[in-house]
Image (cartoon, rainbow, N blue to C red):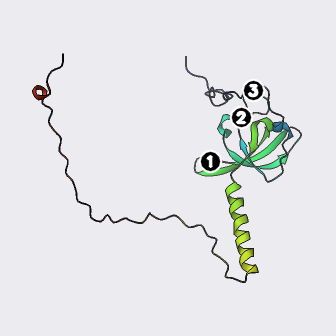
């Protein structure tokens, strides 16, 4: 018989709970506070069937646009053909977690602002805060090194002797 094409087809490993992650869901999942504009990752919990998003959304990151009693409205950009559509879906809180995608940006912005304020206090020139790509490592010159040629020594079975 051909394979089925249901909503949860081919999700055997995708929706499975991890090693030592089975059982009761921690209370932090329910007590976490989400605000409109927060970034969240959709991470489906296979034990909770209600409010489960489609398998396509597993692992996607979106922005919170609505908050209800037990669910969070998440807006995700979905690529359909050659265009991106804004998809709005409600996901229960068990299936989403706060995203860490902006941590680096926020830390960099904070350090840049600190550098600028310090420069203003010291009446120095404002430093450049642009990110610069790391170039290739500098070359090294080896001095007083002579090349050495290595040749293979042929194995002689008679000279080595047979050990029986």
> Of discs 1 and 2, which sits in the foreground?
2
**Dot 1, crowdedness within 10 Å: few (<14), some or many (≥20)?**
few
- The nearer-to-camera label among 1 and 3 is 3
Q: Is residue 27 above or below residue 1?
A: below
The crowding category of the residue bearing disc 2, from other C-alpha atoms within 10 Å (few below 14, some 14 to 19, many at least 20), is many
Query: Relative to 91, does residue 162 appear above or below in the rendering?
Result: above
The alpha-carbon separation of the residues under discs 1 and 2 comes to 20 Å
In the image, taking residue 141 as reference, residue 102 lies left or right, namely: right
- The quadrant of the picture occupied by the C terminus is top left
Whichever of callouts 1 and 3 sits on the residue coming sooner in the sequence is 3
| Residue where numbered disc 3 is placed | 47
Q: CA distance from mark 2 to mark 3?
A: 9 Å
Front one among 4 and 65? 65
Question: In the structure shown, which secondary structural element does the residue marked by tag 1 occupy?
Answer: strand
> Badge 1 is on which residue?
79
Q: Position of residue 54 (x, y in %)?
A: 70, 35
Q: Please give left or right for residue 116 compared with residue 66 in the image.
A: left
Q: Against 59, is 160 above or below?
A: above
Q: Position of residue 31 (x, y in %)?
A: 86, 40
Image quadrant containing the N terminus: top right
Check disc 2 and report the residue beneath it: 44
Query: What numbered label is drawn on residue 104?
Result: none
């Amino acid at each position: 018989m051909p394979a089925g094409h249901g909503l949860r087809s081919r999700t055997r490993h995708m929706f499975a709970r991890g090693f030592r992650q089975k059982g009761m869901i921690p209370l932090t999942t329910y007590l976490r506070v989400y605000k409109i504009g927060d970034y969240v990752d959709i991470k489906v919990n296979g034990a909770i069937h209600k409010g489960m998003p489609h398998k396509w959304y597993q692992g996607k990151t979106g922005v919170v646009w609505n908050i209800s009693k037990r669910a969070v409205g998440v807006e995700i950009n979905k690529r359909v053909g050659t265009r991106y559509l804004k998809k709005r879906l409600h996901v229960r809180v068990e299936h989403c977690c706060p995203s860490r995608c902006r941590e680096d940006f926020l830390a960099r912005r904070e350090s840049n602002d600190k550098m600028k304020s310090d420069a203003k206090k010291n009446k120095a020139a404002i430093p450049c805060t642009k990110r610069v790509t790391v170039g290739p490592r500098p070359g090294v010159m080896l001095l007083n090194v002579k090349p050495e040629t290595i040749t293979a020594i042929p194995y002689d079975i008679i000279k080595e002797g047979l050990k029986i």
